[in-house]
């Protein structure tokens, strides 16, 4: 047997033992947020009069003065250098989807030329990274490369290794957002304003409403040596080929199963490192597919939670390396098994401690709950196309509609009890129905607003957007995505909706209607208006696709076309009225999304071409050669009739291999030709569409032949680790 990279990789992979992780010295009580410049730590390092001003500005969303920034910088540097930091960086989230850092040393010279450590308010406050290479969708031409990163004091600074990281927004010199954080912050503020106004119908003490986010991060682990032997995983994050493993997830024996020791060691170290950074990880378990896992924190304020998710994703990649793993955050690393999502659990909470999307303790609170619930439904209904656009990407496209993943149609699951409650409210008679007694208990014609106790077992895995008792779970979000993309769209849609609701209710009140009656009237109408977004059935079924189409929900599956939803009049108006994204910011985001789509496919298609030419076809030819030699030898030993008979199967096999091999060669030629044509298209949208319409189908065609070949060719000659090895090796 000749040595083959696949067998070398397998040998290494099987040899990797669990890495020991010292847990005893990492008690959460001690280490939690030890590397974060929390408000408590600020008190130790910054004068209290400065801090009071700082917290005041943060809480009232007012801009920061340079004087305060200077004083904070001095304290921050002292704290960070005590932890061993020698560098600082603005930490921001450009539209590439990842995070960006540029490290500068604290090191400087003083006026006498002596080396000192220096960090001033101005560099804490604002920096001008060379922004010309970040995607901007045309907002910032390269000759006008100025982009600013500016401190976001609502997310605390932290130290990783030798650097102080300062969470920042990233904007063009003309003020437009070039990142995810800026519009997320704007959307949080828009929801706050709109939700306070509505919550005040129920309680005048509500002064602020916070958006909460708790994500569930799914991911795959793969051994590093196998990963290294799969150029497609290495370069695109997914396998572009691979015959499905005979056993994959059909037995459901991985889900919630015992976590393999090697993986547990990885998770333990990840949790420790995440704890130090103040990421409140809480849950970990095996997911449905082999070697697929999930990790989830306790929910937090959405901006912080979103930062923590970005931070965790990079931490996962670092920690995985200590354990000879690579982490796959791609939505669909393997065909035939589950993909990975990032469920974004979303809720709204008041400063008075009420969760606005959870049933309350009394009927009055329940009216408030129903108000917010119905407004969310209405927003999701109206903007279902946009919400889908907020979660699609070249990578998530492989997951949507696949194994156990939500379909590419946005609908909301409520469960039977809540559906029943809404039906009752919708059919109740406003004139007969409402009695509000002194205790503010509201009775409807149908009795008191049903005591809404929600049964958490009423679950539906196929729903892209589910109500789960005290929160909405946006499940269509992809595992590699920045949560902010989806959350900011949802926030903006809900903010717009709540504002419209308030104005409708106020109009009725102005006409002399009692407040409760006005609320009730509008809610009743809304329940009917947005009924079409509610769907509790099987999202995988073909009937649902037909039904959804009839209901007028967005059923498009082509990613470049789905992105158009960002530019409809309705969307542009919504984002403008809420102040979350301006028309030019929307346009630039679409340009980036289309470009990103094309680039991902361009890379995938090149890698596929390379792999089939340099790995697959040579293996096929080698095996054919062996077969041909055998056939020729037969002819030497046996007379021609007998040799013919004895060679029949092998001749068939030679033909079969030849058939697939020629189809592959023709396919690669065609794919290259189509790719070149697509690459020459200058309009980003058209180009993305060309990749979608022409390059994707031929890639799928090529893959079919490659996967067939994998079945027919001698295992010893196959050089790429197979699915059964990638998925099952520990
Ligand atoms: P499941 O898989 O059953 O949905 P998990 O425990 O895996 O549950 O994850 C639930 C996620 O929902 C966690 O991130 C958790 O913090 C979050 N979550 C729970 N309650 C809320 C809430 N009120 N608002 C936002 N997120 C929440
Ligand atoms: Mg979960």
Image (cartoon, helix red, strand yellow):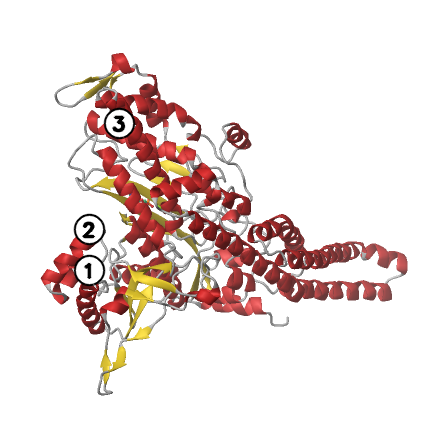
Q: Quadrant of residue 79?
A: bottom left
The answer to whether residue 448 is above or below residue 545 is above
Q: Which residue is mark 2?
A: 59
Return the disc, 3 or 2, that comes first in the chain's sequence.
Answer: 2
Disc sitting over residue 506 in the figure? 3
The answer to whether residue 669 is above or below residue 536 is below
Q: How far is mark 3 from mark 2, CA to CA?
A: 29 Å
Helix, strand or loop for disc 1 = loop
- Camera-nearest residue between 22 and 44: 44
Residue at the top extreme, as displayed: 432
For the C terminus, which image quadrant? bottom left
Return the disc, 1 or 2, that comes first in the chain's sequence.
Answer: 1
- Categorize mark 1 by other alpha carbons within 10 Å: few (<14), some (14-19), many (20+): some
Residue at left 28%, top 38%? Answer: 194
Return the disc, 3 or 1, that comes first in the chain's sequence.
Answer: 1
- Categorize mark 3 by other alpha carbons within 10 Å: few (<14), some (14-19), many (20+): some
- Camera-nearest residue between 497 and 666: 497
User: Where is residue 388 drawn, in percent x and y?
Assistant: 46, 42
Disc sitting over residue 38 in the figure? 1
User: Where is residue 90 drawn, in percent x and y?
Assistant: 32, 65
Helix, strand or loop for disc 2 = helix
Q: Is 533 left, or right, of 190 in this rendering?
A: right
User: Where is residue 285 drawn, in percent x and y?
Assistant: 36, 50
Helix, strand or loop for disc 3 = helix
Asked whether residue 370 appears in the rendered view, the answer is yes
For the N terminus, which image quadrant? bottom right
Label 3–label 2 contact, CB within 8 A: no
Where ligand 1 lies, by image quadrant?
top left
Q: Is mark 2 within 8 Å of ligand 1?
A: no
- Camera-nearest residue between 374 and 468: 374
């Amino acid at each position: 047997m000749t040595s083959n990279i696949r067998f070398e990789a397998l040998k290494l992979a099987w040899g990797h033992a669990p890495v020991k992780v010292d847990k005893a010295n990492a008690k959460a009580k001690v280490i939690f947020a030890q590397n974060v410049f929390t408000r408590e730590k600020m008190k130790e390092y910054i004068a209290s009069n400065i801090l009071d001003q700082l917290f005041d500005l943060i809480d009232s969303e007012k801009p920061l003065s340079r004087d305060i920034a200077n004083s904070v910088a001095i304290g921050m540097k002292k704290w960070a250098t005590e932890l061993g930091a020698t560098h600082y960086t603005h930490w921001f989230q450009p539209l590439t989807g990842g995070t960006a850092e540029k490290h500068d040393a604290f090191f400087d010279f003083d006026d006498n030329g002596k080396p000192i450590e220096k960090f001033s308010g101005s560099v804490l406050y604002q920096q001008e990274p060379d922004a010309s290479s970040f995607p901007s969708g045309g907002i910032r031409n390269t000759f006008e490369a100025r982009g600013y990163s500016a401190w976001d004091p609502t997310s605390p600074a932290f130290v990783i290794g030798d650097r102080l990281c300062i969470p920042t927004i990233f904007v063009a010199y003309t003020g437009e957002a070039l990142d995810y954080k800026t519009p997320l912050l704007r959307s949080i503020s828009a929801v706050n304003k709109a939700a306070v106004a509505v919550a005040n119908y129920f309680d005048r003490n509500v002064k602020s409403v916070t958006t909460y986010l708790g994500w569930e991060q799914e991911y795959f682990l793969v051994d590093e040596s196998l990963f290294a032997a799969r150029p497609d995983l290495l370069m695109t994050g997914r396998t572009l080929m691979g015959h499905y493993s005979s056993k994959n997830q059909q037995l459901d024996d991985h889900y919630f199963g015992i976590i393999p020791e090697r993986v547990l060691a990885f998770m333990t170290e990840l949790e420790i490192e995440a704890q130090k950074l103040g990421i409140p990880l809480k849950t970990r378990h095996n997911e449905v597919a082999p070697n697929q896992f999930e990790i989830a924190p306790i929910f937090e304020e959405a901006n912080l939670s979103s930062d923590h998710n970005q931070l965790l994703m990079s931490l996962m990649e670092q920690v995985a390396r200590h354990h000879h793993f690579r982490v796959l955050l791609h939505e669909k690393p393997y065909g035939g098994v589950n993909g990975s999502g990032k469920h974004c659990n979303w809720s709204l909470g008041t400063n008075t401690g009420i969760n606005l999307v959870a049933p309350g303790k009394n009927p009055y609170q329940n009216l408030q709950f129903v108000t917010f619930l119905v407004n969310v439904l209405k927003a999701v209904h109206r903007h279902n196309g946009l919400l889908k656009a907020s979660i699609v990407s070249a990578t998530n496209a492989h997951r949507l509609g696949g194994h156990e993943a939500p379909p590419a149609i946005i609908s909301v699951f409520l469960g039977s009890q809540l559906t029943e409650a809404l039906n009752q409210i919708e059919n109740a008679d406003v004139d007969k129905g409402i009695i509000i007694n002194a205790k503010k208990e509201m009775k409807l014609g149908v009795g008191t607003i049903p005591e809404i106790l929600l049964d958490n077992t009423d679950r539906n895995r196929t729903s892209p957007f589910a109500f789960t008792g005290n929160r909405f779970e946006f499940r269509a979000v992809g595992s590699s995505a920045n949560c902010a993309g989806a959350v900011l769209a949802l926030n903006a849609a809900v903010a717009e909706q709540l504002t419209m609701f308030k104005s409708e209710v106020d109009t009725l009140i102005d006409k002399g209607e009692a407040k409760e009656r006005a609320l009730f009237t509008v809610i009743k109408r809304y329940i009917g208006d947005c009924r079409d977004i509610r769907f509790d059935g099987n999202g995988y079924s073909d009937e649902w696709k037909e039904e959804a189409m009839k209901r007028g929900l967005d059923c498009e599956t082509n990613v470049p076309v789905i992105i158009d939803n960002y530019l409809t009049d309705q969307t542009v108006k919504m984002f403008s009225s809420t102040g979350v994204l301006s028309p030019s910011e929307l346009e630039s985001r679409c340009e980036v999304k289309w470009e990103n789509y094309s680039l991902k496919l361009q890379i995938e298609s090149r890698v596929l071409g390379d792999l089939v030419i340099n790995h697959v076809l040579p293996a096929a030819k080698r095996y054919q050669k062996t077969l041909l030699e055998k056939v020729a030898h037969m002819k030497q030993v046996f007379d021609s009739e007998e040799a013919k008979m004895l060679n029949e199967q092998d001749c068939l096999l030679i033909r079969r291999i030849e058939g697939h091999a020629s189809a592959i060669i023709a396919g690669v030629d065609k794919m290259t030709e189509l790719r070149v044509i697509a690459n020459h298209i200058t309009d980003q949208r058209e180009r993305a569409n060309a990749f979608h319409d022409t390059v994707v189908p031929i890639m799928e065609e090529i893959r079919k032949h490659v996967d067939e070949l994998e079945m027919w060719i001698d295992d010893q000659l196959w050089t790429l680790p197979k699915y059964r090895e990638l998925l099952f090796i520990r």
